Image (cartoon, helix red, strand yellow):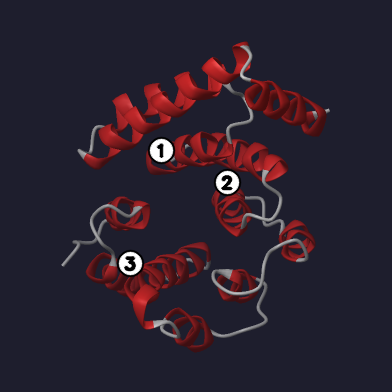
C-alpha cells in the first residue's frame, strides 16, 4: 500500500501535475524546519516538518527530521513511528533503521530481530558498523576505527560514532561511560549536526554537565 502511494506520487511529480507543486511545497517546509533547527527553535522546526509531512506523508527526509525532534523531547514512541515510516519508504537508509532501533529501545522495546532483518537491506560502509555494534557483532573500538577510515568524513563519522556508543551505554544503564561518550560526541560534532544537539539533550537527561 505504502509503496503504491509513493510510486503514484513520484509519477505525478515527474509529470508536472498537482502533486509536483505539493511535493515542492513539502520540500520548502522541510527547509524551513532545517533553518529553524539550526537556530535551536525546535518548536518551529517541528511545526514546519509536520506541515511537510501533511503535504507528503511519505517524505522520508522530513519524517526523519521530525522524528529527531520527538527524540529530543523524549517522546521515543512517536520518534520510532516516524523513523518506521521513513524506513518503509527508503528501505536501504541505515539511519532510519538505526535511529528507529534506538528510539524503540529507549521506549522499552529492544527489537534486535528487526534490526538484524533490516541490516540485510543496508548498504555496505558507514554507518553499518554502528548497527553491527548494537547487534553485539563488533566492539566499540571497531566502530571508532571505521569512523576514522576516511579522513574527509572523519569528523562527522566520529561524531555519530561517539553519540551512538553513548546510546548503547545509556540503554545499559551505564551513566559514566555514557556521559564520556556523549561528551566526546559534543567535542567531535559540528554544531549543525543533529547528534550535536542530541548529545547535549542526553547529557541533560543524565543530569551531568556537558564539560
Q: Is residue 47 above or below residue 74?
A: above
Left/right of residue 5 with respect to residue 166 in the rendered view: right
Left/right of residue 131 with respect to residue 116 in the rendered view: left
The answer to whether mark 3 and mark 2 are in CB contact below 8 A is no
Label 2 SS: loop
Q: Is residue 161 above or below residue 7?
A: below
Q: Residue furthest left?
A: 211
Q: Is residue 28 above or below residue 96?
A: above
**x then y, percent, for residue 95:** 56, 56
Residue at x-position 46% and y-position 35%: 66
Q: Nearer the viewer, residue 186 or 35?
A: 35
Left/right of residue 43 with respect to residue 171 in the rendered view: left
Label 3 SS: helix
Q: What whole-number distance in Å separates the C-alpha atoms at marks 3 and 1?
A: 18 Å
Residue at x-position 51% and y-position 81%: 143
**x then y, percent, for residue 135:** 67, 72
- Residue 107: image tag: 2
Judge depth for marks 1 and 2 and give the one in front.
Answer: 1
Hey, which quadrant is residue 65 in on the image? Answer: top left
- Which residue bears the numbered disc 1? 69
Label 1 SS: helix
Mark 3, Cα crowd under 10 Å, few <14 / some 14-19 / many 20+, is many
**x then y, percent, for residue 83:** 59, 42
Mark 2, Cα crowd under 10 Å, few <14 / some 14-19 / many 20+, is some
Residue at x-position 51% and y-position 68%: 168
The answer to whether mark 3 and mark 1 are in CB contact below 8 A is no
- Residue 36: image tag: none
- Which residue bears the numbered disc 3? 182
Q: Residue furthest front?
A: 15
Amino acid at each position: 500500500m505504502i509503496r503504491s502511494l509513493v510510486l503514484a506520487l513520484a509519477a505525478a511529480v515527474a509529470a508536472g501535475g498537482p502533486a509536483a507543486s505539493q511535493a515542492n511545497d513539502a520540500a520548502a517546509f522541510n527547509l524551513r524546519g532545517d533553518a529553524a533547527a539550526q537556530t535551536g527553535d525546535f518548536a518551529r522546526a517541528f511545526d514546519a516538518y509536520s506541515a511537510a509531512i501533511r503535504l507528503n506523508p511519505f517524505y522520508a527526509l522530513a519524517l526523519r527530521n521530525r522524528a529527531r525532534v520527538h527524540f529530543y523531547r523524549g517522546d521515543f514512541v512517536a520518534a520510532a513511528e516516524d523513523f518506521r515510516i521513513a524506513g518503509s519508504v527508503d528501505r536501504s537508509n541505515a539511519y532510519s533503521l538505526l535511529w528507529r532501533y534506538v528510539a524503540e529501545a529507549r521506549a522499552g522495546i529492544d527489537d534486535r530481530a528487526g534490526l538484524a532483518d533490516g541490516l540485510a537491506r543496508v548498504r555496505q560502509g558507514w554507518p553499518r558498523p554502528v548497527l553491527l555494534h548494537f547487534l553485539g557483532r563488533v566492539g566499540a573500538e571497531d566502530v571508532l576505527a571505521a569512523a576514522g577510515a576516511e579522513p574527509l568524513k572523519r569528523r562527522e563519522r566520529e561524531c555519530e560514532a561517539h553519540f551512538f556508543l553513548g546510546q548503547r551505554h545509556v540503554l545499559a544503564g551505564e551513566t559514566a561511560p555514557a556521559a564520556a561518550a556523549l561528551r566526546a560526541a559534543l567535542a567531535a560534532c559540528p554544531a549543525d549536526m543533529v547528534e550535536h544537539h542530541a548529545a547535549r539533550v542526553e547529557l541533560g537527561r543524565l543530569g551531568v554537565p556537558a564539560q
